Image: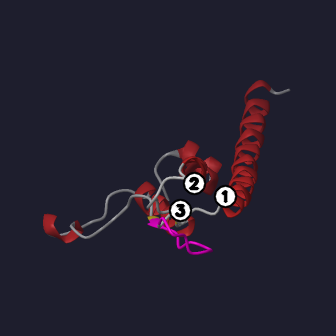
Amino acid sequence: MSSNPIANYFGVHAAALPLREQRMQLIASNLSNADTPGYKAKDLEFTAALQNAAAAAQGPLQTSDARHNNGLNLGPQIYDRAGVQPSLDGNTVDADTERAAYGRAALEYRASLSFIESKVRTMLTAITGQ
C-alpha cells in the first residue's frame, strides 16, 4: 500500500482518473487526425498502465544494483491500434470506432470522478459533522 493516506482513501480511482484522461486525449487525437495520411490510431493499454501506476504508488523497488531497473517501464502503455478497414493512405483511424471509444472512455472517466466526489463528500461530512 502507498504511504499516502489520501491516495489510500480514494483507492484505485486516484490512479485511474489521470489514466482515463490520457486515454480520452489519445482518442481525441485520433479523431483529429482521421484524414492525416499515414497516421496510426493510438490507444492506451489501460489495465497494464493502471497496474504500473499502482506499483509505482507502492514506492520504489528495492534492488541491489542500480542497473536492475533499466528495463522497467512504469509509464503508460501506449500502442498503435490496428485499423478496422484497410486504407490506401495508411491511416488506421476509423471515426465511428473512435467516437464509440471516446463515449465509453468519457463514461468511465465520469464514473471514477463520481466515486472520488462521493468520497470527498463523505470526508467533508466527517469533518464538519453535517
Q: Which mark is residue 34?
A: 2
The mark that comes first in sequence, 3 or 1, is 3
- Three-letter code, disc 2: Ala
Q: CA distance from mark 2 to mark 3?
A: 14 Å
Badge nearest the viewer, 2 or 3? 2
> Which amino acid, by three-letter code, is at mark 3?
Asp
Marking on residue 43:
3
How crowded pointer 3 is (Cα within 10 Å; few <14, some 14-19, many 20+) is rated as many
First in residue order: circle 2 vs circle 1: 2
Closer to the camera in the image, 116 or 93: 93
Mark 2 near mark 1, Cβ–Cβ under 8 Å?
yes
The answer to whether residue 7 is above or below residue 59 is above
Alpha carbons under labels 2 and 1: distance apart: 7 Å
Q: Secondary structure at mark 1?
A: helix
Q: Quadrant of the C terminus?
A: top right
Specify whether 67 is left or right of 47.
Answer: left
Label 1: few (<14), some (14–19) or many (≥20) C-alpha neighbours in 10 Å:
some
Reading the chain from its start, which is encountered first: label 2 or label 3?
A: 2
Instruction: Tell which of 94 and 100 is nearer to you.
Output: 94
Element type at marker 3? strand
- Mark 2 falls on what kind of element? loop
Q: Which residues are magenta?
A: 79-89
x 57%, y 42%: residue = 6
- Residue on which disc 1 sits: 95
The amino acid type found where label 1 is placed reads: Ala
Q: Are marks 3 and 1 in contact (CB under 8 Å)?
A: no
